[in-house]
Amino acid sequence: MGLWRSTQKVEPVLDFDTPWRNVDWGKKKDLEKKLTEIQLNHPELNQFRILLHGPIGAGKSSFIKSVQSVFKGEITTNAGEESSANKSFTKTYKAYTVFNSNSEALPFIFNDALGLENGSGNGIDPHDIVSALQGRIKDGYKFNPISPLCEEDRDFIREPTLQDKVHCLVSVVPANTISQMDSSTSQKMKYIRTKASNLCIPHVVVMTKVDADVCPLVNKDLKTIYISRKIKEKMQKCSDSLGPTMKHIFPVSNYHEETETNDTKDVLILMALLQIVNCAKKYVDEQHNICK
């Protein structure tokens, strides 16, 4: 006589009974409207400048492309993406403008940076990121891991304007490898955060690859992201390693293999972006605004 086996399907147990961060999954249009209509309130500004940095393969360029895709309503390929976790696509300092479906430029731009690597002489030199924060790097500057920008270089801006400067620093880190980040890269990111803080530049963390085998619950349904205990643990690890509080850390899922956009990913991306742009606006208002 064979053993009886239950064929009843066992549903996964939710880590938390209720979401620990509230998300209105139907507010995509409202988020887009807020970001489109945000006011610069400064005569020297055309757009807020957002600088992305982080380890190689973290998804910096993919995040830019994902934001562009959200506002276009279709998958775009304007910003370069890392094709390998061991190779950085970005080689030069370049600004990326975001356009809506009517081809209108939005009031913020992104600058991407060469990825950080373990040890000295590998990846971007942190001093180049500090120069970018100060607005001293010209568009098109080619990063050199062993020789950061200096005052004698032709790409050095001696008298940066408010538009040249960075208004919000964004660290992009992958959720699936944050626990294995080497100490050298972590120390470089802390150094950059400290320099940004000294300049009063706000700092936000975008945690990517949340659906890259980090949590089975989230792999199955991205809307459970703020119910997942594992995701919250990864966010806390970001906070402990890099310094920002949990309220400045935003988990997202970049577009990678998809051929069409979906509202769930879009809402997470827009929530992160709204926080970033609001931080940039607050920085300008508090540090440089002359038109109250």
Image (tube, rainbow, N blue to C red):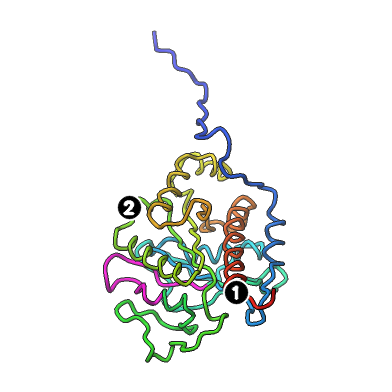
**Residue that appears at 45% across and 62% down:** 171
The correct choice, above or below, for 59 with respect to 135 in the image is: above
Residue 222 image position (x, y, % from top left): 55, 45
**Residue that appears at 52% across and 29% down:** 11
144 or 77, nearer to the observer? 144
Dot 1 amino acid type: Thr
41 or 5, nearer to the observer? 41
Count how many numbered circles sit on residues in the image. 2
The correct choice, above or below, for 234 with respect to 205 in the image is: above
Range of residues picked out in magenta = 111-129
**Residue that appears at 68% across and 57% down:** 31
Q: Residues within 10 Å of mark 2 (few under 14, many from 20)?
A: few
Residue 100: quadrant of the picture: bottom right
**Which residue matches tag 2?**
180
**Which residue matches tag 1?**
97
Residue 90 image position (x, y, % from top left): 43, 73
**133 left or right, relative to 72:** left
Report if residue 114 lies within the magenta region: yes
**135 left or right, relative to 146:** right
